[in-house]
Image (cartoon, rainbow, N blue to C red):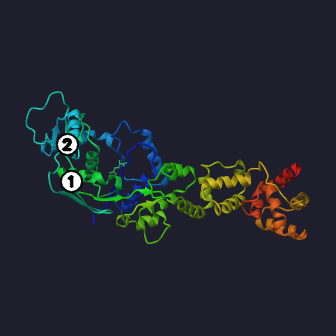
């Protein structure tokens, strides 16, 4: 089998959104999984819509998720001369021609076709033109598309796609100002970069027959195409901002792990039996473009959360600590000793969905309560004062001591946990919910006493 060579070819018009990252991921997995090449090409010929910031945003997202590419980034804006050479070559071979029809003439033609109930289409009037060109018109260049027959190809996702030649006109490959058009540059680049397999969104399916004609006119070998269906929301509609059509980096800011996001995206349009959890190494091993699904995939925020919970649990505390540096951490975190940090991270990662909620959970334990839930227990104050005395005599430097302290206290006062623990929790943490109390006590260490004093002083 020939080497698989793929590419991701974004137009830098804004953030890299998750649909784009999914396309990039499929191409990456397919190439890298088989020892092939994966290239990045920035399609930045539309100077009015493209920006350097958008290119940087794409690169930043790639860096975050760890998708690396081979060689240098290819920028289409730096290749205009090369595209023009190919246009010249087609003109010289009579496979393309200058068309001098003005915009007004073209519009008038379309108008009359519409009036006759026909599909508006260029009538090829300059295809075999040998006369003197009209003065003052900068011509466009059009490709001589076949007049009959069909353009057929087998798409790896859609199956056999057939387009009748009569449905295509002699489309423009260079505008009046000499700049090449979108389908032209894509085809030239894919061919020159030696791309063997193109995986992209099915919004590009209608471009493919035109690109095939360009390949054929220049004698280039056709790549394999795979047009993947769009990602839909749970209601079956096009993904909108509200559903999560956000920039990739927004997911980072929300506290999703790259492992979870990549796993999630890999399963949007690709499957391997009913397996849901895949490490990147597994994806590289198992992904095959022939397993891409032809049915639209559905973006489920719950599934992303579920995966993130899974990957959070699997992340070491040392790694979590590094990742959490991008979030708002309570200053007290840095004053904890290693076992306290470990305890807090272990306790929180069991119950949090994102790094962001983990950082919130840290504040709940480590930032002194700003307010207190109400306590209905009339004995609470006296019990808490007693507990404070017991606490003064105990060192909270291991979890066992902490547990013994709690048990001994309950026993000596003949209390059921429910008769005291909620009050203790509110006094220490301000709220009734949260991590296990003995773990919280251990993490608070000396702070526990201060918290109790503060609480009792105000009660
Ligand atoms: N630049 C196109 C886009 O961002 C992709 C072109 C392609 O993959 O062929 O949608």
Q: Which residue is mark 2?
A: 122
Which quadrant: the N terminus?
bottom left
The foreground one among 58 and 414 is 414
**Label 2's element?**
loop
**Label 1's element?**
loop
Disc marking residue 129: none
Disc marking residue 220: 1
Distance from Cα at disc 2 to Cα at disc 1: 26 Å
Residue 290, given in percent of the width and then of the height, sits at: 34, 66
Q: Who's the residue at 22% across and 42% down the image?
A: 115
Given the current orientation, which residue lies at the most extreme top position?
Answer: 136
Specify whether 91 is left or right of 393.
left
Specify whether 134 is left or right of 314.
left
Q: Who's the residue at 29% across and 41% down the image?
A: 79
Determine crowd level at label 1: few under 14, some 14-19, many 20+ residues with C-alpha closer than 10 A. Answer: some
Q: Is residue 55 above or below residue 176?
A: below
Q: Who's the residue at 48% across and 62% down the image?
A: 263
Q: Earlier in the sequence, mark 2 or mark 1?
A: 2
Q: Is residue 318 above or below residue 131?
A: below
Residue 25, given in percent of the width and then of the height, sits at: 42, 57
Res. 193 visible in picture: no
Q: Where is residue 127, by image quadrant? A: top left
Q: Where is residue 108, by image quadrant? A: top left
Q: Who's the residue at 37% across and 59% down the image?
A: 228
């Amino acid at each position: 089998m020939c080497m698989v060579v793929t590419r991701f070819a974004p137009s830098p018009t804004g953030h890299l959104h998750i649909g784009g990252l999914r396309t990039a991921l499929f191409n990456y997995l397919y190439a890298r999984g088989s020892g092939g090449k994966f290239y990045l090409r920035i399609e930045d010929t539309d100077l009015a819509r493209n920006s350097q910031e958008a290119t940087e945003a794409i690169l930043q997202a790639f860096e975050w998720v760890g998708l690396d590419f081979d060689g240098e980034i290819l920028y289409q804006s730096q290749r205009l001369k090369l595209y023009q050479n190919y246009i010249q070559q087609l003109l010289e071979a009579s496979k393309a021609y200058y068309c001098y029809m003005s915009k007004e003439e073209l519009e008038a033609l379309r108008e009359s076709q519409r009036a006759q109930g026909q599909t508006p289409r260029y009538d090829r009037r300059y295809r075999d033109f040998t006369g003197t060109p009209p003065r003052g018109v900068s011509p466009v260049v059009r490709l001589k598309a076949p007049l009959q027959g069909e353009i057929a190809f087998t798409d790896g996702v859609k199956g056999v796609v057939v387009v009748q030649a009569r449905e295509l006109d002699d489309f423009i490959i260079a505008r009046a100002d000499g700049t090449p058009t979108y389908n032209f540059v894509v085809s030239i680049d894919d061919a020159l970069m030696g791309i063997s397999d193109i995986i992209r969104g099915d919004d590009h399916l209608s471009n493919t027959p035109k690109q095939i004609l360009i390949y054929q006119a220049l004698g280039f070998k056709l790549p394999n195409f795979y047009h993947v269906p769009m990602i839909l929301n749970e209601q079956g509609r096009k993904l909108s901002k509200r559903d999560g059509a956000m920039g990739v980096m927004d997911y980072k800011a929300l506290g999703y792990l790259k492992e979870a996001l990549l796993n999630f995206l890999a399963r949007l349009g690709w499957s391997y039996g009913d397996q849901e959890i895949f490490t990147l190494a597994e994806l590289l091993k198992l992904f095959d473009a022939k397993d891409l699904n032809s049915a639209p995939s559905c973006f489920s925020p719950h599934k992303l959360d579920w995966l993130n919970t899974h990957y959070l649990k699997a992340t070491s505390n040392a790694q979590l600590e590094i990742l959490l540096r991008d979030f708002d951490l309570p200053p007290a975190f840095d004053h904890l000793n290693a076992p306290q940090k470990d305890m807090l991270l272990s306790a929180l990662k069991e119950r949090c969905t994102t790094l962001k909620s983990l950082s919130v959970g840290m504040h709940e334990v480590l930032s002194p309560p700003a307010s207190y839930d109400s306590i209905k227990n009339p004995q609470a104050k006296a019990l808490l004062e007693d507990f404070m005395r017991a606490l003064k005599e105990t060192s909270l430097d291991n979890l066992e001591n902490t547990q013994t302290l709690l048990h001994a206290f309950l026993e000596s006062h003949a209390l059921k946990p429910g008769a005291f623990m909620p009050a203790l929790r509110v006094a220490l943490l301000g709220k009734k919910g949260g991590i296990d109390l003995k773990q919280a006590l251990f993490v608070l260490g000396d702070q526990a006493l201060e918290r109790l004093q503060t609480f009792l002083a105000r009660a």
